[in-house]
């Protein structure tokens, strides 16, 4: 991959500039992800995503974790 490559986001199909050769300048460095959030994205996509999609995937992951916790707590109260 070149320093600045125009690519399509595999999730939303929008075009963005990937700067893997200058990673500190890439749009993805502005998205703070935990290891688990990053792994969740990697489990669904092999290619780079645009920053807005990374943020949406982060929200999706955390909403799923919140739902899991809620279901666990609800189960305790049903006993």
Image: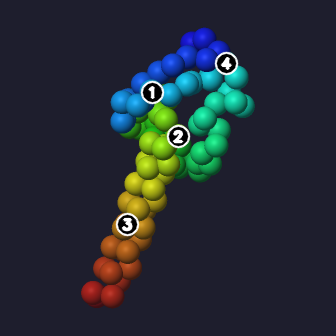
Closer to the observer: label 2 or label 3? 2
The vertical placement of 37 against 66, above or below, is above
Which residue corresponds to mark 4? 21
The CA distance from mark 4 to mark 3 is 38 Å
Dot 2 or dot 3: first in sequence order is: 2
| Residue 79, image x, y percentages | 28, 88
Which residue corresponds to mark 1? 15
| Residue 59, image x, y percentages | 45, 56
Residue sticking out furthest to the front:
15
Crowding near the residue tagged with mark 3, few <14, some 14–19, many ≥20 C-alpha atoms within 10 Å: few
Dot 4 or dot 3: first in sequence order is: 4
Dividing the picture into quarters, in which one does residue 71 lie? bottom left
Which residue corresponds to mark 2? 51
Query: Which SS class for mark 3?
Result: helix
| Residue 23, image x, y percentages | 68, 27
Dot 3 or dot 1: first in sequence order is: 1
The CA distance from mark 2 to mark 3 is 26 Å
Which residue corresponds to mark 3? 68
Any part of residue 61 in sight: no
């Amino acid at each position: 991959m070149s320093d600045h490559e125009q690519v399509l986001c595999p999730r939303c199909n929008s075009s963005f500039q990937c700067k893997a050769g200058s990673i500190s300048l890439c749009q993805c460095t502005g998205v703070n992800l935990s290891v688990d959030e990053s792994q969740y994205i990697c489990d669904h996509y092999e290619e780079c995503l645009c920053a807005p999609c990374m943020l949406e995937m982060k929200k999706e992951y955390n909403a799923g974790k919140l739902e899991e916790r809620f279901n666990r707590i609800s189960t305790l109260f049903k006993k």
